[in-house]
């Protein structure tokens, strides 16, 4: 497997990263997971736009245009003859003797490589169960940061409870998102999802669903909702690059839509592939 390491393509076992890279010590970096379907990137430019946002907010000085990142990623896919899956990409602040302040003369470290992703067809067909979990993360969830301990711990709690996703809340009146997904509820035909602010990651799939909602004439609003609304929703579904769209049919002990995937999620899913040749959303 070829890995893009800074501006070079190297074999995986030759990809040397310093032990004092700040990704290791501090999780001091940002990342993206970009889907590849049939050898083609899906919404690459939207992912790169969000990457620029994360870099700027984290004050990591890496100019993706100067490094021709879009072309390099295309080349990475071709060199690996990669057809279906994801490209994982991370940029850390670079390697420097361990010390909290930003190092002065350090160059960021970029790695990108293919990862296996298979379509979650069974989950899409049957729906999944989720648990509610307190959102114990920091307050800059809009940055796609490498610090994922809060997400990882919430996801594991879901799996330990026999569920597949943890739906996070700050307090009873404030459901935010999933441990690795955005969450949508439907009531009386209207879709509601958390506003894109510092409490959630503004998912690229989430943005794609806004685009599809317009095409499908499905009303969609960005509003904070409560645990009560979540549990009483006609439908609940999640979205992400790897999940696409998946219905949630049970949350803790409460069944949603009688334990069946709902019609709006199904509409989004059908439209998802019909319109996926769109080059970029914004
Ligand atoms: N929210 C969180 C916390 C995530 O980790 C992810 C994806 O990894 C998402 C939402 C969905 O984002 P996207 O649709 O860009 O994959």
Image (cartoon, helix red, strand yellow):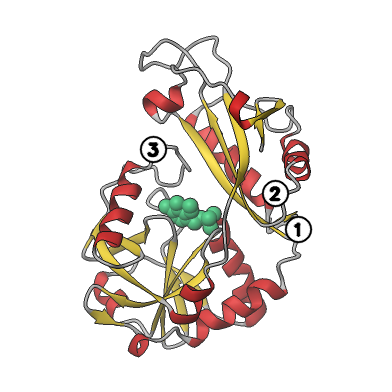
Where residue 9 sits, quadrant-wise, is: top right
State how far apart marks 3 and 1 are (Cα): 30 Å
Q: Which residue is mark 1?
A: 279
Camera sees residue 112: yes
Q: Using the image, determine if residue 92 lies above or below residue 84.
A: above
Mark 3 Cα-neighbour bin, 10 Å: few <14, some 14–19, many ≥20: some
Q: Position of residue 84 (x, y in %)?
A: 67, 57
Secondary structure under tag 3 reads loop
Q: Is residue 48 above or below residue 3?
A: below
Task: Tell me what residue is drawn at x 34 percent, y 81 percent.
Answer: 233
Residue 175's x, y, as percent? 31, 63
- Marks 3 and 2: in contact by CB < 8 Å? no
Q: Quadrant of residue 55?
A: top right
Query: Which residue is labeled 3 in the image?
Result: 147
Q: Is the CB of the residue bearing disc 3 within 8 angstroms of ligand 1? A: no
Which residue is located at x 68 percent, y 72 percent? Answer: 273
For image coordinates 48% across by 71% down, the residue present is 221
Residue assigned mark 2: 45
Which residue is depicted at the point 56% across and 21% down? 16
Q: Nearer the viewer, residue 67 or 187?
A: 67
Q: Earlier in the sequence, mark 2 or mark 3?
A: 2
Which is more foreground, mark 2 or mark 3? Answer: 3
Q: Residue 50, position in %: x, y?
A: 58, 45
Asked whether disc 2 touches disc 1, contact meaning CB atoms under 8 Å apart, the reply is yes
Marked residue nearer the N-terminal end (3 or 1): 3
Quadrant for the N terminus, please. top right
- Left/right placement of residue 199 relative to residue 190 reads left
């Amino acid at each position: 497997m070829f890995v893009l390491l800074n501006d070079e393509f190297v074999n995986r076992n030759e990809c040397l990263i310093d032990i004092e890279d700040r990704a290791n010590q501090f999780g001091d970096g940002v990342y993206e997971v970009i889907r590849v379907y049939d050898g083609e990137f899906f919404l690459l430019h939207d992912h790169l736009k969000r990457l620029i946002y994360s870099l700027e907010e984290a004050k990591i000085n890496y100019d993706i245009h100067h490094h021709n990142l879009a072309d390099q990623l295309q080349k990475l896919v071709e060199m690996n003859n990669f057809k279906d899956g994801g490209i994982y990409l991370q940029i850390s602040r670079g390697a420097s003797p361990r010390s909290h302040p930003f190092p002065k003369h350090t160059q960021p470290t970029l790695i990108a490589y293919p990862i296996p992703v298979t379509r979650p067809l069974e989950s899409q067909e049957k729906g999944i169960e989720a648990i509610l979990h307190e959102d114990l993360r920091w307050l800059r969830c809009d940055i796609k940061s490498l610090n994922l301990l809060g997400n990882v711990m919430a996801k594991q709690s879901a799996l330990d409870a026999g569920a597949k996703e943890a739906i996070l809340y700050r307090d009873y009146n404030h459901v935010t998102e999933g441990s690795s997904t955005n969450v949508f509820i439907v009531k009386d035909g209207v879709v509601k999802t958390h506003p894109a602010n510092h409490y959630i990651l503004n998912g690229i799939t989430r943005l794609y669903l806004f685009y599809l909602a317009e095409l499908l004439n499905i009303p969609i609003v960005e509003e904070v909702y409560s645990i009560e609304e979540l549990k009483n929703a006609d439908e609940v579904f999640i979205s992400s690059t790897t999940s696409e769209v998946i219905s949630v049919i049970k949350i803790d002990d409460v069944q949603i839509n009688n334990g069946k995937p709902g019609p709006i999620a199904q509409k989004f899913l059908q439209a998802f592939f019909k319109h996926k040749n769109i080059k970029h959303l914004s």
